[in-house]
Image: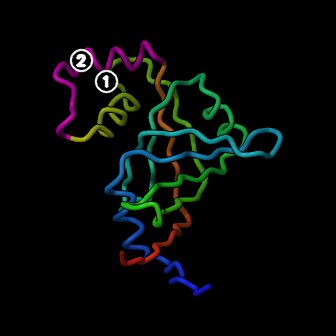
């Protein structure tokens, strides 16, 4: 049996680019038992601040996990099954947006790509309040990942 190519580590820049290109990833939080809780999430990556932002509701399991234990990681698949990026760090859960257009509501609105901005911003901000939305901010202190170069 011949040995194939080994995975190569991706540079910080390549990892950040991968995070910027994707929109969905798997967020891992820590359950009381110590086991991981994983869920697929839409996210927004701020490469300059090194923060991954997620929108969720205040009563979701992941928000409760992070209030108790802020350790979290986001796994993002690359352009093929052989590449990935992981963003690790500590997360914080914002206050609930309670007034349409408050700071949390504006932060949530800012996470939406320009092409997908809601047509009726006021109605969108009211919906965020009704849903009791919060922002999860994962402050990334470690990025890692690999790619496997296979011809064929």
Provide residue 50's location: percent of width, then percent of height: 44, 60
Which quarter of the image is occupied by the N terminus? bottom right
Label 1: few (<14), some or many (≥20) within 10 Å? some
Q: Nearer the viewer, mark 2 or mark 1?
A: 2
Q: Residue at x 42, y 68 (%)?
A: 15
Which SS type dominates the magenta stretch? helix
Residue closest to the far bottom: 2
The circle drawn on residue 34 is none
- In this rendered view, identify the residue nearer to me: 148 or 11: 148
Q: Residue at x 44, y 33 (%)?
A: 55
Provide residue 16's location: percent of width, then percent of height: 39, 65
* Among numbered discs 2 and 1, the one appearing first in the sequence: 1
Q: Residue at x 62, y 46 (%)?
A: 28
Residue 115 part of the magenta-drawn span = yes
Please report contact status of discs 2 and 1: CB closer than 8 Å, yes or no: yes
Disc 2 from disc 1: Cα separation: 8 Å
When asked about the image quadrant of residue 6, the answer is: bottom right
Residue highlighted by disc 2? 122
Which quarter of the image is occupied by the C terminus? bottom left
What is the secondary structure assignment of the residue under circle 2?
helix
In the rendered view, tell whether residue 51 sits above or below residue 39.
below
Provide residue 42's location: percent of width, then percent of height: 42, 40
The circle drawn on residue 101 is 1
**Residue range highlighted in magenta:** 114-131
Residue 40 part of the magenta-drawn span = no
In the rendered view, tell whether residue 114 sits above or below residue 121.
below
Q: Residue at x 53, y 69 (%)?
A: 144
């Amino acid at each position: 049996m011949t040995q194939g190519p080994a995975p190569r580590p991706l540079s910080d820049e390549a990892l950040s680019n991968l995070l910027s290109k994707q929109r969905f990833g798997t967020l891992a939080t820590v359950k009381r038992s110590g086991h991981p809780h994983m869920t697929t999430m839409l996210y927004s990556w701020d490469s300059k601040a090194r923060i991954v932002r997620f929108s969720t509701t205040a009563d979701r399991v992941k928000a409760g996990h992070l209030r108790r234990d802020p350790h979290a990681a986001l796994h993002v698949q690359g352009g093929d099954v052989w590449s990935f990026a992981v963003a690790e760090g500590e997360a914080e859960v914002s206050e609930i947006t309670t007034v349409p257009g408050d700071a949390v509501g504006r932060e949530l609105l800012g996470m939406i790509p320009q092409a997908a901005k809601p047509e009726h911003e006021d109605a969108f901000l009211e919906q965020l309040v009704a849903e009791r939305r919060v922002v999860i901010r994962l402050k990334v202190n470690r990025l890692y990942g690999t790619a496997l170069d296979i011809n064929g």
